[in-house]
Image (tube, rainbow, N blue to C red):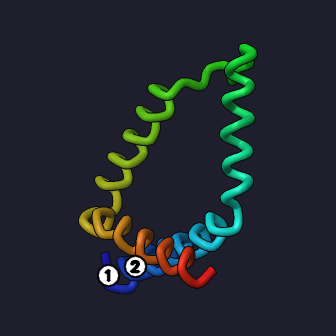
Amino acid sequence: MSAISAIVPIILLFADGLIFGVAAKKGVMSAILIIVGLILAGAIGLTIPFLTTANIWSHVVNIATSQAKHIGPVFYTMPIFWIIGFGIGLWKG
């Protein structure tokens, strides 16, 4: 993997974290209302079929494992740059 091909995903991940941070700052009320809606739906017995926490978690772990094997050591630095971008997005958004 060349140096440029290792830097591009990190820059894109930083930008993703930045945009997500701005969106998170602007959408706190929306997130709270979504959580309240899901809790109320669960209280009256409505659920999303074929969607469980265990299925979601195993799918996320499988994706992370395959990406770590495919990308290599750069994969482990990506969350750091996403968190930095997210923090700047919250701060400056």
Give me the C-alpha separation between circle 2 and circle 1.
Answer: 5 Å
Mark 2 residue element:
helix
Is residue 64 found left or right of 46 in the rendered image?
left
Determine the residue positioned at 70% across, 37% down: 36
Q: Which residue is mark 1?
A: 2
Q: Nearer the viewer, residue 68 or 55?
A: 55
| Residue 93 relative to residue 37: left or right | left
The answer to which of 58 and 86 lies nearer the viewer is 86
Residue at screen point 44% across, 41% down: 60
Q: Quadrant of the N terminus?
A: bottom left
Residue 65 position, x and y percent, is 33, 46
Q: Residue furthest left?
A: 73
**Looking at the image, which residue sits at the far top?**
45
Marks 2,1: beta carbons within 8 A: yes
- Label 2 amino acid? Ser
Q: What type is the residue that disc 1 sits on? A: Ser
Q: Position of residue 82 (x, y in %)?
A: 44, 70
| Image quadrant assignment for residue 28 | bottom right
User: Which circle marks residue 5 in the picture?
Assistant: 2
- Crowding at label 1, few (<14), some or many (≥20) Cα neighbours within 10 Å? few
Q: What's the mark number on residue 15?
A: none
Out of 65 and 30, give the one closest to the viewer.
Answer: 30
Q: Residue at x 62, y 64 (%)?
A: 24
Q: Is residue 36 above or below residue 43?
A: below
Q: State the quadrant of the C terminus.
A: bottom right
